[in-house]
Image (cartoon, grey):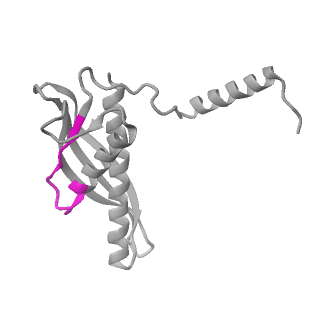
Amino acid sequence: MKHLGPMKTVTMALTLLLALAACGYHLKGSGLKAPEGVETVAVTVLENRTSESGIEMTFTNDLTYEFTRSKVLRVVDEKTADAVLTGTITSLGVQTISYTANYDSDERRVRVTLNLSLVSKDGKILWSDPALAGIEEFKVSDDRFVTDRNRREAIETIAERIAERVHNRILQDF
């Protein structure tokens, strides 16, 4: 194996870092900063105003996971938290986006909208988004159970994406 000179090694490393930066990748921890005075956060169970049973736990768990995973803020109970993330799942809608030759639904799109706020223990709103939305498509099957599973997986994908987006927005706004 041929040894690269120090200049070529540095050049290759810089090229790789620039390529990663151009693709939107960032190193963990870069640019993430908690609001001043906030070291701990609690995530309350979201209120669910939709007819989709159980999604409040899916969204709440994904939000909790994102904050736990990043370790920028320590996740604690509401009584001891410096700030509390609260919110409501305000709507869930499904629409057909493509049809079969027989005019049956072939693919649908689910859209979930949330109203979220991060509030400090003294009641100050540190961050909020009253119309945070996520969209995901899913296939429709002749088997109703398969279609229901596909819809549920689409909602879970939305929950994961929204949790990551909320986490990053809260910590990058400061």
Q: Quadrant of the N terminus?
A: top right
Question: Residue shown at 28%/59% (left/top)?
Answer: 94
Q: Is residue 7 above or below residue 70?
A: above
In this view of the protein, which residue sits in the foreground, 97 or 1?
Answer: 1
Q: Is residue 30 above or below residue 103?
A: above
**Drawn side of residue 21 relative to residue 62, left or right:** right
- Quarter assignment of residue 106: bottom left
Give the extent of the magenta segment.
41-57
Q: Position of residue 14 (x, y in %)?
A: 68, 24
Question: Residue shown at 31%/26% (left/top)?
Answer: 34
Q: Count of labels shown?
A: 0
> In the rendered structure, does residue 53 fall within the stretch colored magenta?
yes
**Drawn side of residue 53 relative to residue 34, left or right:** left
Q: Position of residue 33 (x, y in %)?
A: 36, 25
> In the rendered structure, does residue 11 fall within the stretch colored magenta?
no
Question: Residue shown at 45%/73% (left/top)?
Answer: 101
In this view of the protein, which residue sits in the foreground, 53 or 39?
Answer: 39
In this view of the protein, which residue sits in the foreground, 37 or 157?
Answer: 37
- Quarter assignment of residue 42: top left
**Drawn side of residue 131 relative to residue 31, left or right:** left
Q: Is residue 153 above or below residue 39?
A: below
Question: Residue shown at 19%/63% (left/top)?
Answer: 53
**Drawn side of residue 154 relative to residue 5, left or right:** left
Q: Position of residue 51 (x, y in %)?
A: 16, 61
